[in-house]
Image (spheres, grey):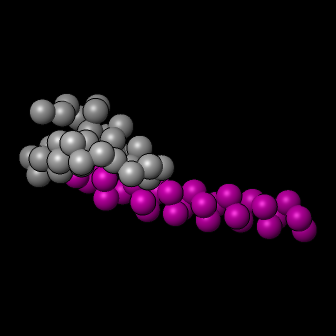
């Protein structure tokens, strides 16, 4: 059984690489039982998108 620290690490790593079957299964079980980690996993894609938008905005301002 994963603890929250391991689960959030896997959620973050899943943004960069494909998780193994074992990792995905453990993470899914944890997310079913832990609303905090479930919320974190739902917020990560939104945070990445916001940071990309912010970085692109900075690049546009620097060029002007």
The residue nearer to you, when weighing 13 against 58, is: 13
Q: Position of residue 16 (x, y in %)?
A: 48, 49
Instruction: Identify the image quadrant of residue 45.
Output: bottom left
At a point 29% along the width and 31% down the height, the residue shown is 5
Give the overall secondary structure of the magenta segment.
Answer: helix
Does the magenta segment cover residue 14? Answer: no
Residue 20 in the figure: left or right of residue 26: right
Q: Relative to 11, is 53 on the left or the right?
A: right
- Residue occupying the far left of the picture: 33
At which x and y percent is residue 32? 11, 52
Which residue is outermost to the front? 21
Determine the residue positioned at 68% across, 58% down.
55
Give 38 or 20, whichever is nearer the viewer: 20
Residue 58 seen from this side? yes
- To which quarter of the image does residue 13 belong? top left
Residue 58 lies in the magenta stretch = yes
Residue 39: percent from left, percent from top: 26, 53
- Give the percent coordinates (x, y) of residue 27: 21, 45
Q: Quadrant of the N terminus?
A: top left
**Left or right side of 49 for 13:** left
Q: Residue at x 57, y 57 (%)?
A: 51
Q: Quadrant of the C terminus?
A: bottom right
Which stretch appears magenta? 38-64
């Amino acid at each position: 059984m994963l603890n929250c620290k391991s689960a959030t690490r896997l959620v973050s790593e899943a943004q960069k690489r494909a998780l193994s079957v074992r990792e995905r299964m453990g993470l899914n079980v944890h997310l079913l039982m832990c609303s905090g980690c479930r919320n974190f996993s739902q917020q990560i894609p939104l945070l990445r998108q916001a940071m990309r938008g912010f970085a692109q905005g900075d690049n546009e301002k620097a060029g002007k």
